[in-house]
Amino acid sequence: MKTPSRILIGLVLATSIAAPAALAGPARSVLDRPAVASAKAAHTLLLDVAQAGSRLVAVGDRGHIVYSDNQGGSWTQASVPVSVMLTAVHFASARQGWAVGHHGVILHTVDGGVHWTLQRADREANSEKAGAPLLGVWFADENTGYAVGAYGYFLVTHDGGATWTDNASAIANPDAWHLNAIRGRATGPVFIVGEHGKLFRSMDRGVTWSSLGSPFDGSYFGVSPLSDDLVLIYGLQGRLFASTDQGSSWHQVQTGVTSGINAAIRLENGKIVVAGNAGVVLVAADKQLDFVPDQRADRQSISALLPAGGDGLVTVGEGGAKFIKLGQK
């Protein structure tokens, strides 16, 4: 059995992909037990954060979802019906959002992340994917969305998540390599990245997919289409690659680090920031991508980040949600 390749803040997802028989009992309990209310929910392991209008919403361990209406100044815990680890979150609008996680869980909110309902989960213990995590989710609009994960997990919905169907045949992944992330912008291509250098692109918002030549045969942890002429893919061993032609060709960007890279964004002031394990933060003034290190003093790993005005960032990862300012340790 392959072990999952995506490492978020040092967490090996193999802990959730055990033999199906061993998962039968625990799977039922975590799927039927709501996330426990905790004053520390925003300060425990969080794996992804997304924008819901002006609100920030972050997801993570034990089914914790927290939201902030003041750019990360304070956080409120949401109502969540499961207590599985949640790995990714995406909003198609200010109110409609989806989160995914272990045991094939997909959650939905219609009020900007305050309350969540369970749309699907893997309750059967007799399939290859039993207990496997979904690792990425992206919606083209409020109806059509995609979720990817371990063992080539690839789901699609065309009715806002009321039904989800297997979409694995849409991509060339016969060995079922793990798919670690899916991401697109409001316009332009959509990308999927995974282990073993798997790299896919859709030019029609997910209707059809093609394989792209990969500059690396290791694992990609994420992809960030930052503009029409700049896409970044990144992952294992500090590897970072850029494309200026929407993924048709790639060149390696030197990072000077060996820790895994999990996230990349462009700030409002044009700076580009990438971040990852061991508190790695790298900053480039523009798309020339001459990165300068700005590593966090606490060395806690960062799994995702969002702009927070000027040189400010909201990060999630080890230690939960944090506001940081570039240049200040």
Image (spheres, helix red, strand yellow):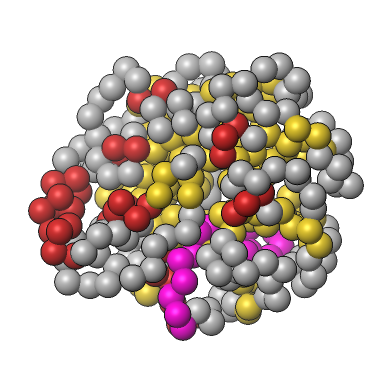
In the displayed structure, 36 sits above or below 158; it is above
Query: From the image, which quarter does the N terminus lie in?
Result: bottom left
Residue 239 placement: quadrant? bottom right
Q: Residue at x 49, y 40 (%)?
A: 9
Q: Is residue 217 left or right of residue 9?
A: right
Please report the residue visible at 45 percent of the width from the left and 26 percent of the height from the top.
319
Residue 310 falls in image quadrant:
top right
Residue 46: image x %, image y %? Answer: 43, 35
Residues in magenta, as a range: 174-193
- Whether the magenta-drawn stretch holds residue 186 is answered as yes
Asked whether residue 137 appears in the rendered view, the answer is no
Is residue 240 positioned above or below 257 on the image? Answer: below
Q: Indicate whether residue 131 is drawn in magenta.
A: no
- Classify residue 104 as left or right of residue 269: left
Residue 298: percent from the left, percent from the top?
56, 22
Furthest toward the left, the residue is 25
Is 91 situated left or right of 125 in this image?
A: right
